[in-house]
Amino acid sequence: MSKPLTIAMPKGRIFEEAAELLKNAGYDIGTGAEESRKLILEFPEQNINVMMAKPMDVVTYVEYGAADIGIAGKDVLLEQDRDVYEVLDLKISPCYIAVAGLPGQPLSRIAPKIATKYPKVASDYYREQGEQIEIIPLNGSIELAPLIGLSDRIVDIVSTGRTLKENGLVEYEKITDITSRLIVNPVSYRTKSDRIDPLVEKMGEQIGVSS
Amino acid sequence: MAKKLMFEKPLGMRDTLPFFYNKKEHVRKKLTGVIEAHGYQFMDTPLVEYHETVGKMSATQDQQLFKLLDQQGHTLVLRPDMTAPIARVAASQLKNEAFPLRLAYDGSVFRAQQSEAGKPAQFEQVGTELIGDHSSYGDAEVIALLIDSLKQTGLQEFVITIGHIGYVRSLFEEVMPNDEEAVETLLSYLYRKNYVGYRSYVSSLSVPEEAKDNLNVLLRLRGGEEVFEEARALSKGQAGLKAMNDLKQLYRTLEQYGVASYVQFDLNLISHMDYYTGILFEGYAPNVGALLCNGGRYDALLPSFELNASATGFAVHVERLLEALNGSSEVEKIAICLLVDDRTLKQGLQEAERLRNDGERVVIQHRDQVANIEGFSRKFKTVIDVDKEGVKTDE
């Protein structure tokens, strides 16, 4: 028996949809994974292992080859710029990254400050706009920053826009759409293509990509 | 910035401890032995080069170069690869030699700004350059030599993936004849391994549906020689045809070398944005998450050093190869220890000389200097207490 195919799955809200896609592609990893506290689940009859990872970390596991494939948000791929194959747009958990702030507040003329979980995405975006900004990195509740005068704008994920609205913030510009992607380690892509290619093909069929 | 602690090393730098040094030396000897047996001549170049020559010509991105200044204010770089320095030598001191040249190297190269584990800033490469041969026989020679070297180190499972930049460019230029920007964009999606971005860019192009389909088919042109036929049907231009002939010829030659089972083709493989000019390849081993070796044809490099010559070569990452070989990290006990004191020193020295002449490694240790004889003894294959056991007298 060859070594099992290792799949890094994001814990949390994307898990269920992602597991469903895998199931339809012929890999049933069940639904119990989320409730269990186990981090590695083995499915010897299908010769796969599933790693339960924090969504931000899936790309890292795949880049280093700890997992052969993984399901990761485009936001993380953009932010971390890692050496992995981005083979399919799974079109699940759609949202977008946007610039938001207090209504009617102009960007400061001297060193505008941007609070964000995505320092690279934010600075790339403003560079393209020809604007030099300063980043304030935060890990959560980014909406606080403009409210308390810490930053002029925030760059953050928006899915429904409710959090922005409830905190009296408005969206200024949309930066990019985000969905989950199927990613593959470059070495596994070559050395385990007999396992990975059929999986990619079957998942591709479900979302209308023929590969 | 925190004060450095005494044990700290600069970011990305590693020590080579004795057990690892021995393992590395063993693998290095295997690799270089095979390369020498194929008539390649080893050479070395300085660790430091000028930024405006070798630094700019190397395949390494500028922000990854270690830079320093000399006393005249010139920017210097720690060599980021061996290919550019060797090209410099070939185009100057060796330019009057009869070509083709078969050169080889074994040395450390430096890439800065790697802040994560597993991405060292200094690593060792063993590699070859075949300069002045523009044929696919030349490409086959270096790929076969690479495969042979890897096999000789004891590596059993690995795969060499081969692509051709000329084919990809030709396909793109046929679809978009006067749109260099679109061609570069598509190439950059492939280089970044972003198939999702590639597909979505293709669908945004204003070209016929059939051409879009062809561009998407490129993504699945991977596998054995069976991909050649499909590849040929996609690209009908001269350059595409030539590239496919190169690849076919290469495959036939690799069959004659008896190494075809180690290769596969991936026609969308782009290892570098603008360095390679023809056949290019990467090697992978299971259990090592990053590429083990790579190489290809770089016919534009020597002309930038003012020598009109084509070239191809490969480089093996020695540390990653060691990881792939995954041997034990036990220190091999190969030395003999002779314990002596003031009285038996002379006798011990004579015995040591006799053993060394027989090819043994021998340590002479004065027993007063060892606090823990038992622990110390464990490091050796044999410990002889010259006083107690005496030694055999010379016959």
Image (spheres, coloured by chain):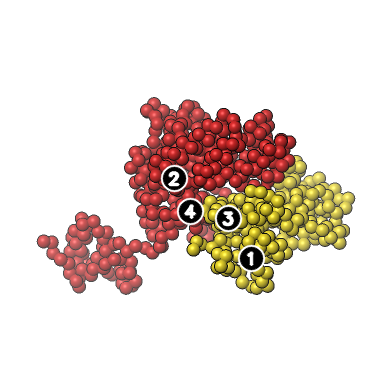
Q: Quadrant of the C terminus of chain B?
A: bottom left
Image mark for residue A36? none
| On screen, residue B246 above or below B217 | above
Q: Which residue is mark 3?
A: A196
Hey, what amino acid is under mark 1?
Answer: Asp
Hey, what amino acid is under mark 2?
Answer: Ala
Q: Which residue is mark 4?
A: B285
Viewer-side residue, A4 vs A82: A4
In the figure, the shade used to draw chain A is yellow
Q: Quadrant of the N terminus of chain B?
A: bottom right
Left or right, residue A8 beside residue B14: right
In the figure, the shade used to draw chain B is red
The secondary structure type at the circle numbered 2 is helix
- Are both tags, 4 and 1, on one chain? no
Q: Could you tell which of marks 2 and 4 lies nearer the N-terminus?
A: 2
Callouts 2 and 3 close, C-beta under 8 Å:
no
